[in-house]
Every structure is written in C-alpha cells, then in structure tokens.
Image: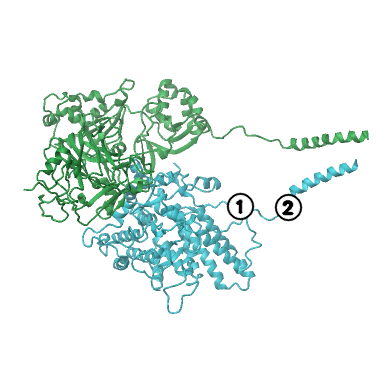
Chain colours: A green, B cyan
Amino acid sequence: MKKHKHFILQIPLLLGLFCLCCLSCNKQVFRETTTDEVNITGYLDEHPESYSLLSEILIRARASGYLGAYGTYTLFAPDNEAITKWVAANGKASLDDFRDAELDSFVRYHVIRDTVGSLRFTDGKIKTPTLFGEFLYTDVANGVFRVNKRAQIIRSNIRCGNGIIHAINEALTPPRQSLAELIAGNPRYTIFAEALRATGFYDTLYYKRGTEVPAEKRFQTAIVESDSVFQAAGIMNFEDLKQRFSKTGDPKNHSDSLWLYVAYHLSNSGNYLEDIASLSSLYTLAPKEILSTKLAGTRVLLNDDVFNGVYEPGAELNRVESDVTAVNGVLHESLQMFAIKVRQQVPVYFDLATSPELLTGLGAAYRNKSTPLVVNGESIASSISYEKMDVITIGSNTYNFSASLETKRPYANGDMLGLQMCSNNANRVKYVDFKTPYLVKGRYKVWVCYAQNGNGPQLQVIFNPGRTDEQTLPNIVFLNQSLSASGVSNLADPNADNLMLAQGYKRYMATTGDYNANGVTGGIKPKTGSEASLNVGRLAGVINVETTDRHTVRLLAIGGTCKSNAIYLDMVHFIPADDPEQIYPRFHQLPGELFYRPQ
Amino acid sequence: MQKIYLIIGIVIIAAGMSSCKKWLDLQPQDGITKAEFWKTKEDVRAALMGIYSSLNEGGVEERIFIWGELRGDMVIPTSTASDDDRFVKNMNILSTNDISDWSALYGAINNCNLLIDFAKDARALDPTFTEDLYNSYLGEALTIRSLLYFYLVRTFRDIPLKLKGSYKDTDVQPTPQATAQQVIGQLISDLTTAQGLVPDYHEPPAQGNNVTESPVNKGRITKPGVTALLADVYLWNEEYDKAAAEADKILATNRYRLQGKATLSIFSSSTSETIFEISHKDSRESPMYALVINSKKPFAVDNVFVNADVFTPNLQGDLDARDSRGEQFLFASDGSIIKYGIENPSYYNFQVYRISDVMLIKAEAAAQLGRGAEALVILNDLRTARGALAATNREVDEADTDDIVRFVIEERARELAFEGKRWFDLLRLAKKDNYSNLDVLVDLVSRTADVSVKQSAINKIKDVNSHYLPVLETELFKDPTLKQNPFYTK
C-alpha cells in the first residue's frame, strides 16, 4: 500500500518530465520588433552603393539623429553621383572642404517635415516648405516628375518608418537671386527693370536670406512684360513708358500711375502658375486692385473677362518663361501688356439663374428644362454654394424654366431659382451664397427681385460674409409679401412707381405702358388686378464695394414660414447708389428684351 | 502498476492518433477533386455554366466599366468615389491603386482553362457526349477566355498569359508576362479555332422567323459572338481588311438588326440588336446599379461634357429634336446611367457586342482601307435609325480617312456610351500608325485632369507606357517574375 502511494506521487513527476522533454525540443522565437521597416537613415545605410555620400553629409550636418528617429519626413535623396557633381560644381574636391553649416543648409533644403508622396505633387510648389524655409517646385517632363525643373525623380515613394524618400539624380540648390536681381539681371526685361528702380519697387523685391521681413512679404509674385512686348505696344524704352503712364512726374508717388502700373504687376505670397490659375483673383500691391485669373484650356489668362456684357480679351502668361523661382518668390512673364483698367460704375442686373458658371453646369438644360442645382452631392455651378450639402432637401434646389409667356409670375429670361431655405429647419439650408458678376468699386443699391409666395421665408442679405468688408444689409426681404407691402395700394396710379421707390420697392418685370424697341407684346404684367403685385423688387440696402472684383452675396433665411418650393428668386440688381434711375430697365421672359420708360 | 503504465501508454498513443487524422487524408482542402468530376457531359455543362456565372458575378462587369470609362471623359467620379478613382482622372496612378485589381478576370479565365483542359476526359468517358456539344463547350470557353484577355491586354499591355488551369493552390506557377503582340496572336488563333467549334444557335429560332430568338443565344457565345470579338481584335491590331471581312460575316446574315430609335429594351430584354451580353435576367442582380444609378453612386455621367460635346444640341433647324441615345433616354440629368436599369435591384443585361458595334467596327475598318464612302453609308444608316441630331453630323470628305475615323469614334461615343468602350476607342485611335494621333489623349487629359495637376498629366500622357495600368503591388509581391510597367517604376 505504501509502495503504491509512492508510485501515485510519481505520476505527475513523470508527466512533468515528459512535457518538459516535448517543450525543450523546439524553442519558440518571438519577434521583438513591430515592423521590419527601417527609418530614413537606415534605408540610406542599407544602400551605401548609392547613398554613402548622403549618409556622410547627414552625419556631419547632425541630421541623422532626427531622420533616424520617429517622425514624419520627406527626403529628396540625391545619389552619390549627384553629390559628386554638386561638390565639383561648388569648386571643391571633396565633402571635407565644406563647412558643417553649409552641409546643414544642404540637408535642410532636401527635407520636408511632412510625408509628401508623389500623389500630392502638383504643377507647382509642394505646399509644405522645406526645413530651409523655402518651397520646392515639382512638375513632369518626359513622363517623369522633376524637382525645381532640374532634378529627376528616379524612384519615388520609398516608404520608411518615419517618412518617404524620393531618389533624385541631381542635388537641389536653393535659388541664388531675389526677384529684383532676377529681373534686373535678365537682358530681356530692361524696361521693366528700370521701372522697378524708378518706382522704388526694386527694394521691395530685393531680399537677402537672413533678413527679417514680415511673414506676408517673405514670398512675392512678379509678373513682368519683356521688352519685346513693350515694343510691340509702341514703348521703345523706359522714357516712353514713363511718358505713357507717369502723370505726376514722380514715379515714387503712390498716386502716380506709373507707380500703380508697376504695383499692379506685383503681389504678396509666392504663386506659381498653378496657384494663379486656381485663385480666380490675385490681390496686387496696387491698393484695392485685383487681377482676375483663369485657365482656358491650358492657357493661364489675366483679366480675361466679360464686363458689362462686353468680352475683354486678357493677357496670357508665357508658360516657358514663367514659374521661375527666386529666393523670395516667383517670376512670371506675360505675353501681352496689362494695366489697371479705369472703370466707371455701371448698374449690374444679375440674373441669378444666368451666371456663366451656372450656364456651364446646366449645359443643354439652360432655357430648356428644370434641373436640380445639386447633383451627386455637388453644386453644378461653382458660383453657387450652400450652407451645407448633407441636408435632405439639397437635391430639391432647382433651376426652373418655363417657356410659355405668362403674366402672373413671369421671370426675367424665363428662368428662376427655386431654393429650399429655412432659418429653423434641419432639413433645409439656412443660406445660399452667390458669386456676383464684376462690380466696379463704389456704392450700390442692392435690389432683390423675386416672385411672391405666401409660404416664403424672410431673407437677410449679407455682402462678402466672413471677409473684412462684410456688410449686412438693413432691409429684410419678406418673400411672402407682394408689392402691396410698400403701402401703395393702387398700382395703376401714375405716381405708383415713385411712391413705391420711396419705400424701397419696385416693379422689375415689363409692365403695361413700358417701351420696348422690338415691340414685344406678350407676357407683360398688368397694372391692376391680383397679378400686378406679385413680382417684387425689394431694396435690401446699400453696399460699399471696395475692390473691383467678383464678390459674394449671401441670402440668409432668418424667419417666417418655410414650406417646400416656396422661394422663387429671380434677380439681384446692383445699381450705383447715385444713379437716379433705379426703376428701369425692366425685364421680360424673352432673353435680352429690355423695357424702358414710356417715351 | 503494469495496468497504469498500460493506461498511460494508451493515452499517449490515442493522443498521437488524433493528430494524425489530417495528414492521413489525401483529399485536397482547397478544391474539388478532378477524379470525381469531369465524368459526364453534365459535368462539363455545369463547368460551362460556372464560367458564365463568374462573368455575371459583378467583378468582371465592374472592371470592364471602370477600365473603359474612368480613364475616358464621359464618366466622372462623384463625391462618394474613392481617392484612387480621382487619382486615375489626374493621371496620378501608383501601383497600389485599386483600379489595377485584375483578380475577377483571372478567376474567370481559370474556369475557362479548366474546362479547356479537362472536357476531353469527360468526352472519353461519356458516350452520350456528342462531338458537336463538346466542340461548342470548348469553343465557348476559348471565346470567353479570349474576351477577358482582350480587355486585359488593352488595359495592362504585357500580361501573364495563362493557358492552363489551376486546380489547387500548388498548381499555381509563376507565369512570365507575354508581350501584347504574343497575347493578340494567341487570341486570333484561339478565336479562329472557336469559330469552327461554336454553333450559330444554341436554341434554333422558330421556323420562318429569324428575328425573335431565345435569350440563350444572346447570353451564351454563338458563332457571331466569336466573329464580333475577332473583328474587334483585328481592328485593335490594325488588320483592317480582316476586321472588315469578319464584320461582314455578321452584317451579311441579316440576323441582327437595329430596332430603330434606341430604347431601354435593348438593355433589358435581349432584342434583335444584341449579339453577346452578360445576362442577369432571372439570375443575379446587376452590379451596375450600385455603381452608376444608386443615389450614392461613385460614378456618374459628366453631363457638362456629354451634353455639350457628345450629344451637342441643335442650334439651328429643329431645336427640340433629341438624340434617342442622349439625356432623358439612356442617362439622366442627375448623371445616372439608366441604360443599366432604374429599378433596385436591376436585372438589365450588360451589353458586350451589339449589331451597332459591329457596324461601327466595319465602318472604321472600311475607312482605314480607303473606302470612305462605304463607311459613311453605314454611319448614316445608324444615325438615321437612332435619330441623331444634325448638330453632331460631321461634314467629311470621303477621301479624308482620318476625319472619317474620328467621326466613327464620335459616333461610338454616342452609340456605346458608358458601356466600357470609350477609353479603348480613344487609345485605339491614338496608337494607330505608331501613335500618330497622340493629340487625342493629350486633349483628353487637358479636359479631365484637375487644374493643379493639368500640366503634369499632359506631360505624363505623352509617355505611351502611361496608357497602360501598373501591375498591382500585391501581384508583384506574389509573383516575383512579374515585371512592372516601366512608367510606374520611377
């Protein structure tokens, strides 16, 4: 019995031994790292045949520390051949001949503190500057990405633990000259260079690395005309230019037209062609004067606009000679002369449903059929934007067209915008923003023209919301009110128009008795009866437009009922505040038919 | 005592036995055994139906649509599309872009390969398996394989040309890429063989009426189906005389006819226009509903371009006239492509070859052969039937080959809009005569790329390697013998 007990004790022992034998046979190897990926310096060390020189530079520049640690970096890595060339180009025999500080600058110009894969390259600058503080420029030549128009990317997007390496075949060197030196040093720009000196802008465009300047003036854009462009315009030398423009005789005077002419060619912040093309307007150093920009096909055009119904051809930028990087910005060349346009204030009758962007978006539907203004979650016209795009009624905002002539609720040009806005309903947007046509600087009366609907909300008009010149207009536009809200009950009264004008109301659609040169008769509003008062022009207030540009008008719902399809917006009139004629012309369903005071 | 040792021994042995079970079983875990299959003609028929099923599963149609339309100009990615889709529009394609996923096509190709390899085993075993039936099955598999390779070779250029089936994972061997010319050569030889194997009808039409025929003759490959594909391959390969001859074989029979103005029924109910379609009727729902019709669709018609430049409205004459293939009829103003059906789920069929396609292949080939007048007659017939607008008529000189070919391509954009053909049409036009029309593609990206990358995109498309997609990164990883398109190695 005792013996037996002894044996029972042995069983666990035996089993234990057995288990131990099994386990000891295959030792488990655990991975202690989370990834095999090396960091940037690790990658360079692994490829000494290409990057031994770069590794050496990194060590001497004390950059291998941060490039070997965790972080987000992009390194443009020149290979050994490229660095050898760079050393020779600097007149040195080897890397030992460089001071550590020089190598430090070299490294900082090749590193961006961000992970910028080739998917983020554009036809312009990389949006994050290098550690050196200046931007790199990318483009594509022969199907391959280039940096600063020289170095080709021979292998892109090499992923490392702490960022991305792009292998390049040439070392990057920061530009040596400032804008002022670039222009003065180019024999093709002698006339402009002289104008720069005469106006004092040479100093504005001059910059030496290390100088303290305000951040907004660190990078600038200059668009110049070459001598041959001037000569084609009959300006043979600087004296001719001065004679043409300088009115005060002192080009340094800020009200002198030559000073303004040169200022109009310069702007703050460094913009490449790609930036210029997508900006739509460029603020220049000439106070309150802008350059309008656009991309037509692949051409970048300045001041190529339709103004007051007239097409004004603009100046084209020369792609080959543009996008020249300077220490303090970018230099472009224009193929034609351009100058500030002196414009007189003119009334702008803005048919909301007929902006050029909307015409593009509507395509064949324009003056043809009613069409949603938002398709696939995006506004079909870049000139119309909404408070938010995720409300369920967003697709119910429509362009409406009706061809048959009518007198109850006709619309100028036969079309109007049926919008869904409300101040307190989560299913509708609160406001819609419209980009206006060009408004010449000055003061304007703003008239909102609509067709009355009993369920329409109340709108407040805000000019340039969110900008420094934001202006909220005083009069609320009650979309549910007809002309009778003006207090004038008899619209047939010969003095009714003046009485209404005094209250800030007007008839904006063709009315019986108005004069039309083509003798159009159909679809003219009567002066009496229930239909007479349904098309309303309401004075929202007076705005002060500070720059000649396209601006923004916001229509904000601030109260009232809001049911579906209750907003019939037709036009917004901007009429110079001093213009005594605020009532005429009146509009008609037929495009282009205007009606004037009875003659 | 002894008993206890015995028990311990038994336990250990039992433990050992239980773990043996798996490696004693010789049945493969990753597939059916071919020893139990390929015995009767029913087995082969089941395999053939499996091939058609892999076509209408969704993946194949989605790839055809995306490869053919996203790189073109008539379809745009909407706000719900992926970033990858938008990068394609900007010529910013990396080898990690999902657009290069070709697995759906190679999956279907493997099914074809298996049938081609093993149908003869069943033929040897099953005495009721007639020669005609065997030939038909074999020819259909060859044709579908060719169709899929034709899409792949036009999309990727150098592709692995796999002609043997894989039953299990271990069968998969690295297959080096064949050049585009080798692939096209293989397709021409396979399709010529298939022409002699596949019958004209799987279900003969009723006597005296050769217009209404069973949808089976549209959803399965018939001899005209093989011929249409062969004509298309010849056209791509710039063998215009052969392309015209093949197209004539179909046009001469009068079996397929235009039904007049285009209607949705062409896409829903296997009309006399269809030669081959991927059938969804009474089967799986079409994958296209989610892609191009649904309110959250990732792809939509570029209405601005299509309404202005493809279906240009009349500015004089009959202003109210509408092309029956245009907006309101086959696509909607919100960008939905309703030729893929409007109900959810949609069971509309995916058109692969229609008689109008063959007419236009013939017209293009004839124009290239200097028979401009013949091409214009065909174009005119088609345009009259469809109610094309005067505004889209190109005034061309019969002797101006280039102008007529461009007119054909424009007409193809209208007739075959959104059917996964646009990019391939433009590429065929651009690459012919040693890339003499590269301007077509430069013009394309100058319209479709974003402002910020337009110049880059234009400079990229001038490199002809960029016209073909990269091999997906994961495929390169799986098969080290694959070589990446040189455009994507930098």
The front one of A429 and B451 is A429
Query: How many numbered marks are there?
Result: 2
Q: Is residue A339 visible?
A: no
Measured Cα–Cα span from mark 2 to mark 1: 19 Å
User: SS for tag 2?
Assistant: helix
Residue B417 versus residue A330: which sits nearer the camera? B417
In percent of width and height, residue B260 lies at 34, 68
Is any part of residue A259 visible from this angle?
yes
Residue B24 image label: 2
Q: Position of residue A323 (x, y in %)?
A: 30, 35
Q: Chain of mark 2?
A: B
Res. A181 image quadrant? top left
Q: Amino acid at mark 1?
A: Asp
Are marks 2 and 1 in one subunit?
Answer: yes
Question: For mark 1, does the 10 Å Cα neighbourhood hold few (<14), some (14 to 19), or many (20 or more) residues?
Answer: few
Other-residue count near label 2 (Cα within 10 Å), few / some / many at <14 / 14–19 / ≥20: few
Residue at x 13% of width, y 55% of height: A520
**Residue B175 vertical position relative to residue B355 in the rendered view, above or below:** above
The residue carrying mark 1 is B169
Disc 2 residue type (three-letter) = Leu
Spot the residue most to the left: A599
Q: Chain of mark 1?
A: B
Residue at 24 percent across and 47 percent down: it is: A452
Image point (47%, 52%), residue name: B158
Q: Are marks 2 and 1 in contact (CB under 8 Å)?
A: no
